[in-house]
Image (cartoon, helix red, strand yellow):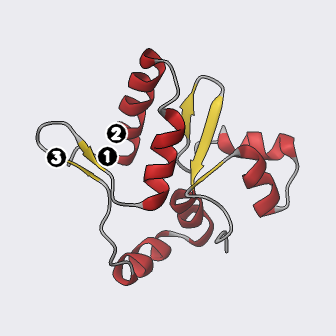
Amino acid sequence: MLEEYNEFLTVDDLQKALGIGKAYAYQLVNSGQFKVIRVGRLIKVPKKSLLVWMYGDNYEEKNHKEEKKEKSKMVPDGSLILTDKEDILFFERIATLPLKKKQKLYRVIYDLLDLSE
């Protein structure tokens, strides 16, 4: 499920994927039941977070064993090494933002996804 969606879903994507209305989709993203990335009015839902919410913690464990591709990570100098295609596409899209918004977004993403380890 959700294979046709990017790694980060919009509220519209969430609405279509779950077959719910717009109001309920916004209610869900505001409920705190799964991780949400917010920058200004932009709301993105990590697909993995949504799948764990839908299928429970066993989804994370099961897919962690099957997944062997290298993940994006931070290195000691503070740089981010992007190896996942979806991560690269996401960061390319936000590269067009003004500097202050980019800095804020990166801090939120690093904290949310715990990339500092």
| Residue at 73% in and 45% down | 11
Q: Secondary structure at mark 2?
A: helix
| Residue at 59% in and 72% down | 55
Q: Amino acid at mark 2?
A: Tyr
Residue 42 as seen in the image, left or right of residue 35: right
Residue 50 as seen in the image, left or right of residue 22: left
Do callouts 2 and 1 mark residues in contact (Cβ within 8 Å)?
Answer: yes
Q: In the rendered view, tell whether residue 97 sits above or below residue 47.
A: above
- Quarter-of-image position of residue 17: bottom right
Do callouts 3 and 1 mark residues in contact (Cβ within 8 Å)?
Answer: no
- The tag earlier along the polypeptide, 3 or 1, is 3
* Residue 113 spot, x, y in % from top left: 38, 47
Q: Amino acid at mark 1?
A: Asp
Residue 84 as seen in the image, left or right of residue 37: left
* Residue 61 spot, x, y in % from top left: 39, 76
Question: Looking at the image, can residue 91 be seen?
Answer: yes
How many angstroms separate mark 3 from mark 1 (CA)?
13 Å
| Residue at 45% in and 29% down | 105
Q: In the rendered view, tell whether residue 108 sits above or below residue 8.
A: above
Question: Dot 3 corresponds to which residue?
Answer: 75
Q: Which mark is residue 110?
A: 2
Question: Dot 1 corresponds to which residue?
Answer: 114
Badge 1, how many Cα within 10 Å: few under 14, some, many 20+? few
Q: Amino acid at mark 3?
A: Val
Do callouts 2 and 3 mark residues in contact (Cβ within 8 Å)?
Answer: no
